[in-house]
Amino acid sequence: MSPDTMLAARLESGATTVNLTRVPVPQPGPNDVLIRVASAGLATGVMRLAAMGAFPVLPTTLGHEAAGTVAAVGAEVADIAVGTRVRLHPNLACRQCVYCTTDREMMCAQQALVGHAAFATGPRPLYDAYHDGGLAEFVRVPHWLVDPLPDGVGFDVGAKVHDLANALRALKCAGLAPGSTLVITAATGTMGTATVTLAPQFGVARLVLVGRNAKRLAAVGELAGTLPTDLVALEDLPADWTTGGGLTTALQRLVPGGADAVLDFSPAGPAGGQALLSMATGATYVHMGGNLENQLAPVSAMMARCWRFVGTRANTRADVHDVLRLLESGVITADRLITHRYPLDQIDQALAALHSRTEPIWMAVVNPAQLESP
């Protein structure tokens, strides 16, 4: 039986920090599932999104990545049982439009994320009802937004399946052929490490990892195993690299013919734009970093080199199922990607660590409940 109240990490209107407070445990409606949260993922940029007005319903409980055990189900839920180990699929979409029915649910006009931002351009009935997320002891979601976790996949990895699926989506968008060379920017962060883990499944024959710090890059390079990997540390480039094109030059020296694709996860700065200029003719540039700076090449250069530009965000249910199959089969492992774990009452310290990047954090989770991961 669930308690009456729970701790939750709440975002209030006008706040610049997260408020840990006690709120009522949500009660499942007839089509809902109540999850006792064992692990919730942390993501950067929450407060930046809040300042941009991306959270239209406040106050709200944060946390779009969560895994745990089903604590209760609604009267009309027949496909999931109490006690099942599950992860939350946070993508709220209508399930009926042309995007939702063609494996592009992140483009739905109602698209939003449980516990996170709303990208919806029109009415958002599901977000209005299910905006509260998983940085709490319990989270309530529609029954169709839970995935059972395979045996051997722990709650921490289950919570971060969302980011692994984001990386898989970016790799799909790159359209890589066998034997490809791939450049990854912001390689030492969550998306970079997830992509390095998945890259061998997409025909990549050579990786070029770009990041600020040489020592941190070297650690990420070890994730590539036997896959040939080059490292480009921004701190080792000429002092004027940001304005002088030093990254472009370094990449052209490493790969004279140009890489077949660039996956740009940089949230700021010129690294992505400079990497783009080093690509091979016919190559693809995929951006998933949310960079607000105007750094793209002239469209004439994109035309002359026949470059393809793809912007993408989040993932689809098909991407998630692909990741779960890879984890279940043992083709990939992700436990070592979880570098930091925090209790819920340290949420402020956790978000500060993510923001400052003073520690080499790959993936971070919060463990609200003391449940044993398998």
Image (cartoon, rainbow, N blue to C red):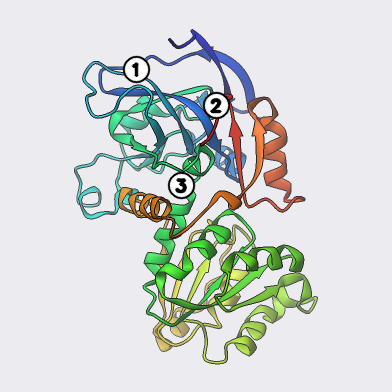
Q: Nearer the viewer, mark 3 or mark 2?
A: 2
Q: Nearer the viewer, residue 213 or 244?
A: 213
Coordinates of residue 233 in the picture (x, y in percent): 72, 72
Residue type, mark 3 in image: Val
Q: Nearer the viewer, residue 105 or 317?
A: 317
Mark 3–mark 1 contact, CB under 8 Å? no
Mark 3 → mark 2, Cα distance in angstroms: 19 Å
Secondary element type, mark 1: loop
Q: Which mark is residue 371?
A: 2
Mark 3–mark 2 contact, CB under 8 Å? no
Q: Is residue 77 above or below residue 145?
A: above
Q: Is residue 14 above or below residue 330?
A: above
Residue type, mark 1 in image: Pro
Q: Is residue 271 above or below residue 108?
A: below
Coordinates of residue 271 in the picture (x, y in percent): 63, 70
Q: Nearer the viewer, mark 1 or mark 2?
A: 2
Query: Residue pushed farthest top?
Result: 4
Residue type, mark 2 in image: Leu
Neighbours of disc 1 within 10 Å: few (<14), some (14-19), many (20+): many
Count of numbered tags: 3
Q: Residue at x 43, y 62 (%)?
A: 170
Neighbours of disc 2 within 10 Å: few (<14), some (14-19), many (20+): some
**Labels 3 and 1: the sequence-earlier one:** 1
**Labels 1 and 2: the sequence-earlier one:** 1
Neighbours of disc 3 within 10 Å: few (<14), some (14-19), many (20+): many
Secondary element type, mark 2: loop
Secondary element type, mark 3: helix
Residue carrying label 1: 28
Q: Residue at x 32, y 48 (%)?
A: 317
Q: Is residue 177 above or below residue 339?
A: below
Q: Which mark is residue 161?
A: 3
